[in-house]
Image (cartoon, grey):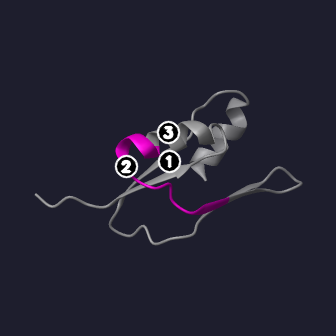
Amino acid sequence: MHSRELKLFAGSAHPDLASRIADIVDVPLGRACLRRFSDGEVSFQIDENIRGADVFVVQPTCTPVDQHLIELCV
């Protein structure tokens, strides 16, 4: 069985939780840039190669739920 590389990224809802998970699974958090524009639009850009990897984004859906869900969908 071939195991693929694990990539872990943090959304803005709870970066401390993402960091703790990364420590537990011994995987560094991936490099990504999250930007919010003045009109409310969101941009999430992954700054590393994730091809062929198993990718997880840690993004709880706590309040404000709508903003955190949009981040997760982008």
Residue flagged by tag 3: what amino acid is it?
Answer: Arg
16 up-or-down from 29: above or below: above
Residue 66 belongs to the span the image colors magenta: no
CA distance separating discs 2 and 3 = 10 Å
47 up-or-down from 29: above or below: below
Residue segment shown in magenta: 22-33
Q: Quadrant of residue 49?
A: bottom left
| Marks 1 and 3, the one that precedes in the sequence | 3
State left or right for residue 6 relative to residue 46. Answer: left
Report the residue marked by disc 3.
20
Residue flagged by tag 1: what amino acid is it?
Answer: Val
Residue at 57% x, 33% y is 60
| Marks 2 and 3, the one that precedes in the sequence | 3
Secondary structure found at label 3: helix
Does the residue at mark 1 contact the one at mark 3 (Cβ under 8 Å)?
A: no
User: In front: mark 1 or mark 3?
Assistant: 3
CA distance separating discs 1 and 2 = 15 Å
| Marks 1 and 2, the one that precedes in the sequence | 2
Q: Residue furthest right?
A: 38
- Residue 57 is marked as 1
